[in-house]
Amino acid sequence: TVKLSPEKVFCQLRKQLDFRMINTSDAPFNTAEWETYLPKTNISMELGKLGRCAVVSSAGSIKHSHLGAEIDSHDAVLRFNGAPTKGFQEDVGEKTTIRLVNSQLITVEEKSFVSDVQFSFGIIILWDPAPYHASIYEWFQKPDYPFFESYKHYRKRHPKQPFYILNPYMQWQLWDILQENSPEDIQPNPPSSGMLGIALMMHFCDEVNVYEFLPSKRQTDRCHYYQSVLDQACTMGAYHPQLFEKNMVKHLNQGTDEDIYNYGKVTLPGLRKVQC
Ligand code: NCC
């Protein structure tokens, strides 16, 4: 296969990804009951046009990075799942504009998700691993985790906090782009929250700096900066096609290899301004 130029891949991301959140015109969410739960404001309106954005991976290698102030200097910061800021500001900053969470977290850890104050800052976006190119209807019947009750529960407790559900198409549209840009067959599982979050911020922002998604010189087997568990698969992936995600992001990087080595930092353009 011929390797596509970064510019071509940016166009694929811009043209082939559906960035919409579930709303009440998406059957079977078109009911009076769902209308009380789904946010009424469009997410782009909620966020406004964002300039410089940061995506903060949860990798253990961000520990001791002292990147906190640099991360907080961005207009918006995206974090993942249960990644805390409290106690870790020096390395990861404290601003949280968007938290991208998977359905496993909100279902399996519902109790802490609903009550832990760290989730009550910023906008939450939830995604669930859907069957390959399933319609919204098919996915609704067969979500990977039955998260709908937890979602409603959270919405009742925090009605003012914007909390969106990502459409199930985007993950597989992104997977198709990863597959098309990989020389080998990649595992048939959706991309990681990390890769989804990077694509989302490229849609919302003019420029995206990603921290410790590509490991820096601090690379470690430590899975998360906030836990001591060791597991190599956290960085390279087992379920998610992370190796391929990281190869693609490396190919798309507009910054320097030195910034990757020192800060685990990758710079990507916003998709609004790419010329296709
Ligand atoms: O670990 P997780 O990921 O929440 O990490 C968020 C994103 O950070 C990047 N990362 C993380 C660790 C590491 N050493 N290197 C990294 O690059 C990845 O891009 C990752 O996506 C997920 O993607 O949603 C994931 O979620 C966890 C878990 O479900 C949540 O933390 C909630 O508890 C998954 N872990 C397990 O299922 C055990 C993980 O596989 C993927």
Image: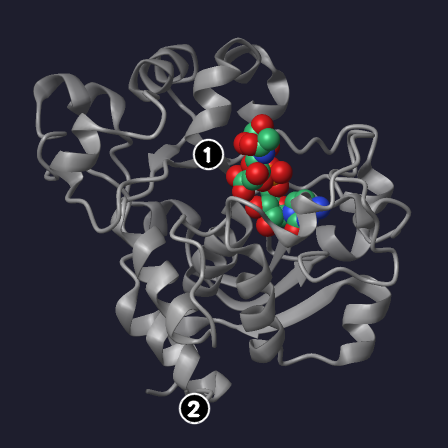
Badge 2: residue crowd in 10 Å (few <14, some 14–19, many ≥20): few
Q: Locate ligand 1 by image quadrant.
A: top right
Quadrant, the N terminus = bottom left
Mark 2 to mark 1 CA distance (whole Å): 34 Å
The answer to whether residue 64 is above or below residue 34 is below
| Image coordinates for residue 57, horizontal then vertical, percent | 66, 49
Residue 78, visible in the rendered structure? no
Badge 1: residue crowd in 10 Å (few <14, some 14–19, many ≥20): many
Q: Tag 2's secondary structure?
A: loop
Residues 141 and 167: in front is: 141
Query: Which residue has dot 1 on it?
Result: 102
| Image coordinates for residue 128, horizontal then vertical, percent | 36, 36
Residue reaching furthest to the front: 185
| Residue 2, disc | 2
The amino acid on which the numbered mark 1 sits, given as a three-letter code, is Asn
Q: Residue drawn at (63%, 81%), measured in percent from left and top? A: 254
The amino acid on which the numbered mark 2 sits, given as a three-letter code, is Val
| Image coordinates for residue 242, horizontal then vertical, percent | 56, 56
- Does residue 194 appear to the left or right of 200 in the view shown? right
- Does residue 32 appear to the left or right of 223 in the view shown? left
Disc 1 under 8 Å from ligand 1? The reply is yes
Query: Which label lies toward us, 2 or 1?
Result: 2
Q: Residue drawn at (22%, 51%), measured in percent from left and top? A: 133
- Does residue 129 appear to the left or right of 73 in the view shown? left
